Image (cartoon, rainbow, N blue to C red):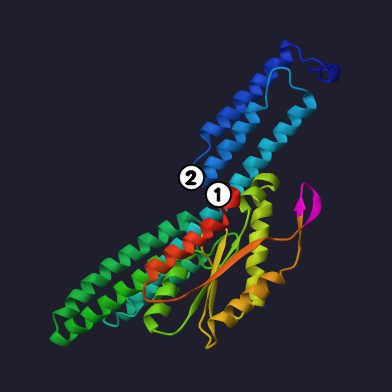
Amino acid sequence: MISLGRFLRVHACDEDASYVRALSLLLQGIELHTLEHNQEDYECFQAELSGVQRGLFPKISIPWTFVLVGRAIKALEEYSRRTAGRLRAQFTELQSITSALSNAITTMVSASEASLGRLRAIQAQLLAAERMDDLRLVKKHLNDCLNDMAVEVAEHRNHSECGRARLAQEAQDFENSIDCAQRRVASDPVTGLPPRAEAEAALSKVADSGVAAVAVVLTLKRLKQVNSRCGHGVGDSLLAKLSAYVRSGASLEEGPYRWSGPALMAIITRNVSFDRIRHEIGRLVADMPEYEIAVGGQMATILASVGWAVFPVTLAVDKLVREMDEFVVSQSSEDS
């Protein structure tokens, strides 16, 4: 049993150094054996634990040891929270794609009523799915149903040329539905906004339509510094508050979307001048309120620094995307 007096001594004895060494080995084991799900999150987690390990030395004071332990626990908690969010997003995406698949197949009117009934039952199972095991079971049922439907479709195709033409059209509709489903991804876990893939699709759609439009990019400056000093939770909170402010304060026809890193993107198609839009966005950013953020158990008031720019939407969408990305990078130079 370790006495309290031993912990209160000014200089650590050899036995205390052994405890510090054991703690360092434990942190190394956590760093080495934590599963990697997202490379950026994983590298940040490893860097944080490495920093904690560098702070452990044989004659470290006991109070400072507890500070480092708390820092390690917080790093593990943040990594677990972000990883859990990404896993939930992936599950939702898979569930959405499978749902779109079953919806597309039910439009194939050449299938029997019995097969369509089986598909509707599978859709109900999909909506109730909460775990990956549930989705695997739905996948098995769907595979069996599709195999049976393939036999039915083959029989219908042998009946008439009209039936074959109809099935060809239905198959094309089915493929288009699957393509749309595969492009869908879960909402951004931090802001709840549609992700960049949907933003780029919206830009292409507006450009192809020929409607005069303007893309607005807003980026939160010094986000990396905020994350480094106050933790990712504070940075995420600021980004979420920015997205909520933009949604409530701007007249947007499309968006906002989570673009990349600290940036949001929206599309304006109103029949107003380019200068009028610039004036509205400038006033929106200038009127941004201060936010109270919890930092280390205390409330701190932070005024978010936001950079912004507007770009005409043209048919050269690839060039437009590059220019928007270059703007975002230029606004993040203070984090370098």
Q: Which of 226 and 285 is in front in this view?
A: 285
Which of the labelled discs sits on residue 39, or is there none?
2
- Residue 31 percent across, percent down from the top left: 55, 33
Query: 33 above or below 164?
Result: above
- Residue 106 percent across, percent down from the top left: 35, 77
Q: Nearer the viewer, residue 55 or 290?
A: 290
Question: Residue 63 is drawn in which quadrant?
Answer: top right
- Residue 307 percent across, percent down from the top left: 61, 63
Q: Nearer the viewer, residue 323 or 226?
A: 323
The N terminus is located in which quarter? top right
> Local crowd at mark 1 within 10 Å, few (<14), some, or many (≥20)?
some
Write the residue at 53% across / 86% down. Answer: 270
Q: Which of 21 and 205 is in front in this view?
A: 205
- Per the rendered image, the range of residues in magenta is 294-301
The residue beneath circle 1 is 83
Write the residue at 64% across / 63% down. Answer: 306
As shown in the figure, which amino acid type bears the numbered disc 1?
Thr
As shown in the figure, which amino acid type bears the numbered disc 2?
Gln
Residue 125 seen in the figure: no
